[in-house]
Each structure stands twice: as structure tokens, then as C-alpha cells.
Amino acid sequence: MELTQIIGFVAGFGTTFAALPDLVAMLRRRSIVGMNPRMAAILGTFQIFWIWYGLMIGSRSVVMWNVIAVITNFLTVAAYLYFRRSETRSW
């Protein structure tokens, strides 16, 4: 494996899983306190462009990491909406 591939792998891993701690914290707390779904939605939207770019240049790693990131961000927004709805009902 070349140095550029290693750097790309590490960068892809880091940026892909950067949002995961927020998702895990929200699921553990079962609360939306401190969460901003707009960031995840915006990030997920632009990651779709990264997937498109990765397809255009033929980079499997760009596509792979960003597909995982889009799924993570989609789950974050979905969890936010779910917990917001359940918190709204309890008032």
C-alpha cells in the first residue's frame, strides 16, 4: 500500500466516523438535547456530491467512505426526528 493510499484511508475513516459519537450519545441518552440535525443534514447532502465525484474519478475509496458517512448522517437525522417526536408527546 502506498503512502497516498494510507493517508486517504485514514482521512476517509476519520471524516466518515466523526459524526458517530453524536449519534451514539443521542441513542444512549434517548434525548435530542444538544443536537443540531441541520449539521448532519448539510454534511450528508454534500457527501452525496463526494459520492458523485468519486464515481466520476473512479475512486472506490471516496465512494465507500462517503456512502458510509451518508448512512451515518441519515441515521443521526432520523434518530433526532424520532426522539424529538417522542419528547414533544411527553409534554
Image (tube, helix red, strand yellow):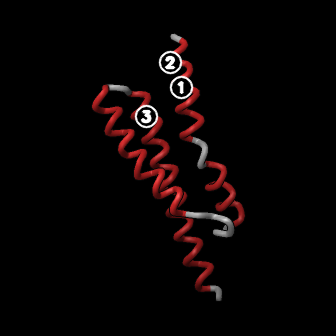
Dot 1, how many residues are within 10 Å of its Cα: few (below 14), some (14-19), or many (20+)?
some
Q: Is residue 31 above or below residue 28?
A: below
Task: Give the residue type at disc 3.
Answer: Met
Q: Which residue is the site of mark 1?
A: 9
Cβ atoms under marks 1 and 2 closer than 8 Å: yes
Q: Which mark is residue 64?
A: 3
Pinpoint residue 27: horizontal percent, then vertical percent.
65, 61
Q: Secondary structure at mark 3?
A: helix
Q: Which residue is mark 2?
A: 5
Pick out the residue farthest to the right.
Answer: 29
Say which element carries label 1.
helix
Single out the mark in the foreground, 1 or 3: 1
Within 10 angstroms of label 2, few (less than 14), some, or many (20 or more) residues? few
Q: Amino acid at mark 2?
A: Gln
Callout in the foreground (3, 2): 2
The residue tagged with tag 2: helix, strand or loop?
helix
Q: Earlier in the sequence, mark 1 or mark 3?
A: 1
Q: At which x and y percent is residue 26?
A: 65, 61
Point 37% across, 26% down: residue: 59
Q: Amino acid at mark 1?
A: Phe
Kindly identify the residue that appears in the image at 71 percent across and 65 percent down.
Answer: 29
Mark 3 is surrounded, within 10 Å at the Cα level, by few (under 14), some (14 to 19) or many (20 or more) other residues, namely some
Q: CA distance from mark 1 to mark 2?
A: 6 Å
Counting from the top left corner in percent of width and height, residue 66 is at 44, 40
Is the C terminus in the top left, top right, bottom left or bottom right quadrant? bottom right
Q: Residue at 59% of width from left, 71% of height from top?
A: 83
